[in-house]
Image (cartoon, rainbow, N blue to C red):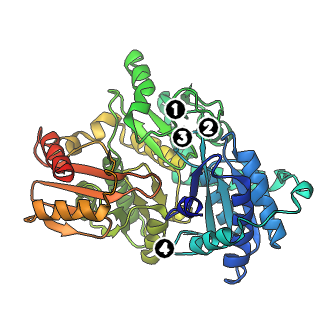
């Protein structure tokens, strides 16, 4: 019981097979309809998508039949990315769910749920009710398993969503205009794309690669393979970007590269010098660019507001201020950010973890939309990617994201007490874990919502001091 309960995270269902099984998915689908959608008078037509993991077809069938048994009406869209499911929620204006564990290892799986356009199902918005229902039913035998229906993809509906999503891609990336510039200047871009054998390969083949006749996309692991044979589909771990880096080093004609995570809702970039762009730098860059576009052509549907995560770098809030935007801090996690974007009618939100959220994409995050936005900006500004981030790299020095494992019996509260005692002269925020600010450096530490670790990051304004500050924080935790 306890293990199942722990599979229900702040933002989604996520666990490891075989402890995570089809019974859990069946009752989760049933509970979603009975405990969330019906009581809130929401549509019972649910867009269903799954990723390429080896366990996804079985779990997809289970959640499909659970929804049916509860009186729901699943619209089967089949294989797709998380942002494809988000596009379906916007297009049909109905709930949706995707069977995926995002960037987690191959034996993991999960379930992300959209309650209604721009509102996710998290522990504070209905997932707790689904969890409690599953726990109450998990010992109940599923008597109709032999009569389960096989989900059949609604190809017409899927093609409609694809077309809707492609139009969003073309709109945010100004694809027609960029193609005209490339054709006029006879400038051909060469971009390497690493999909890690996850859903980024589906995105590239089904949505993106044919939109740009003057861009050569170099295929790195676009073949869908739920065993992720080449490397984990997790670009936030920069070790998984080394294949892009090696290709860029070997071919001076490659302009830059980007990599998707397993469900393709996140993306990271590698510049023309084969250097990985820090996630916070990307958020600051996109924020300033989109604010400039907003002020050149104000849109009354939105405010010049940008949502950023409080544990991230100060470069983001400072960039927003420099661009005369409204900086809205948020806890980390897509449920919180989407809620803040809706509340403040924000044009954009971002996290250093590679999530980029767009107001005109229903406040949802999308890896491919961030990728085409980057292509647009570089073509319009006629710059190399390395040139764009030169000033930020010389101003803010940021550690890699650290995974800190607790000692047996140790809790986050224990860690917090040690840190606040040692760093008692800094300014403290407890919005999301703890962040401690000094004039020339800061650190943030919080519990991961998807893995049993603490996540920590250190930033300094002084070169060559990050490692020493990181060691000081780690030594304090382990004292």
The reply to whether dot 1 and dot 2 touch (C-beta < 8 Å) is yes
Q: Nearer the viewer, residue 25 or 214?
A: 25
Mark 3, secondary structure of its residue: loop
Q: Residues within 10 Å of mark 2 (few under 14, many from 20)?
A: some
**Which is closer to the viewer, label 1 or label 3?**
3
Instruction: Name which quarter of the figure residue 237 lies in.
Output: top left
Residue 447: give its label: none
Q: Earlier in the sequence, mark 2 or mark 3?
A: 3
**Which is closer to the viewer, label 4 or label 3?**
3
Q: Earlier in the sequence, mark 4 or mark 3?
A: 3
Q: What count of labels does the image hold?
A: 4
Q: Earlier in the sequence, mark 4 or mark 1?
A: 1
Residue drawn at 52 percent across, 32 percent down: 194
Q: Residues within 10 Å of mark 4 (few under 14, many from 20)?
A: some
Q: Nearer the viewer, residue 83 or 474?
A: 474
Q: Earlier in the sequence, mark 4 or mark 2?
A: 2
Residue carrying label 3: 105
Residue 203 is situated, as x and y percent measured from the top left of the image, at 62, 42
Residue drawn at 39 percent across, 55 percent down: 351
Separation (CA) of disc 4 from disc 3: 32 Å
Residue 342: give its label: 4
Separation (CA) of disc 2 from disc 3: 22 Å
Mark 2, secondary structure of its residue: helix
Residue 204: give its label: 2
Residue 193: give its label: 1
Q: Earlier in the sequence, mark 1 or mark 3?
A: 3
Residue drawn at 74 percent across, 52 percent down: 60
Q: Horizontally, is 18 left or right of 416 in the view? A: right
Separation (CA) of disc 1 from disc 2: 9 Å
């Amino acid at each position: 019981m306890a293990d199942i309960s722990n599979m229900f995270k702040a933002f989604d269902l996520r666990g490891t097979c075989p402890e995570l099984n089809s019974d859990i998915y069946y009752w989760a689908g049933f509970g979603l309809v009975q405990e969330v959608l019906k009581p809130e008078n929401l549509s019972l037509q649910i867009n269903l998508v799954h990723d390429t993991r080896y366990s996804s077809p079985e779990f997809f069938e289970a959640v499909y039949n659970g929804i049916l048994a509860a009186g729901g009406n699943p619209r089967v869209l089949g294989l797709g990315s998380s942002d494809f499911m988000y596009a379906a929620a916007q297009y049909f204006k109905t709930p949706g769910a995707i069977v995926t564990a995002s960037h987690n290892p191959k034996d993991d799986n999960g379930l992300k749920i959209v309650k209604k356009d721009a509102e996710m199902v998290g522990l504070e918005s209905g997932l707790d009710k689904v969890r409690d229902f599953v726990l109450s039913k998990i010992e109940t035998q599923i008597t109709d398993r032999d009569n389960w229906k096989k989900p059949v993809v609604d190809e017409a509906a899927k093609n409609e969503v694809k077309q809707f999503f492609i139009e969003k891609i073309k709109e945010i990336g100004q694809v027609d205009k960029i193609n005209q510039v490339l054709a006029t200047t006879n400038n051909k871009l060469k971009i390497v794309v690493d999909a890690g054998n996850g859903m980024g390969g589906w995105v590239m083949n089904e949505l993106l690669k044919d939109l740009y006749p003057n861009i050569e996309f170099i295929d790195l692991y676009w073949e869908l393979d739920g065993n992720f044979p080449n490397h984990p589909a997790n670009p936030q771990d920069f070790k998984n970007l080394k294949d892009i880096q090696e290709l860029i080093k070997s071919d001076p004609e490659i302009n830059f590269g980007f990599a998707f995570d397993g469900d393709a809702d996140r993306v990271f970039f590698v510049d023309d010098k084969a250097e990985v762009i820090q996630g916070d730098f990307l958020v600051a860059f996109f924020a300033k660019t989109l604010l400039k576009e907003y002020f050149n052509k104000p849109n009354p549907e939105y405010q010049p507001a940008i949502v950023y995560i409080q544990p991230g770098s100060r470069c983001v809030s400072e960039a927003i201020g420099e661009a005369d935007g409204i900086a809205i801090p948020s806890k980390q996690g897509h449920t919180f950010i989407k809620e803040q974007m809706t509340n403040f009618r924000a044009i954009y939100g971002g996290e250093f973890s590679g999530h980029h959220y767009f107001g005109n994409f229903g406040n949802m995050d999308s890896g491919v939309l961030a990728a085409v936005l980057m292509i647009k900006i570089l073509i319009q500004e006629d710059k190399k990617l390395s040139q764009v981030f030169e000033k930020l790299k010389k101003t803010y020095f940021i550690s890699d994201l650290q995974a800190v494992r607790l000692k047996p019996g140790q809790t986050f509260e224990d860690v917090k007490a040690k840190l606040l005692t040692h760093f008692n002269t800094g300014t403290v925020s407890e919005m999301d874990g703890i962040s401690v600010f000094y004039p020339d450096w800061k650190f943030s530490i919080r519990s991961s919502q998807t893995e049993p670790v603490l996540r920590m990051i250190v930033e300094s304004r002084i070169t060559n001091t990050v490692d020493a500050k990181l060691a000081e924080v780690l030594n304090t935790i382990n004292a």
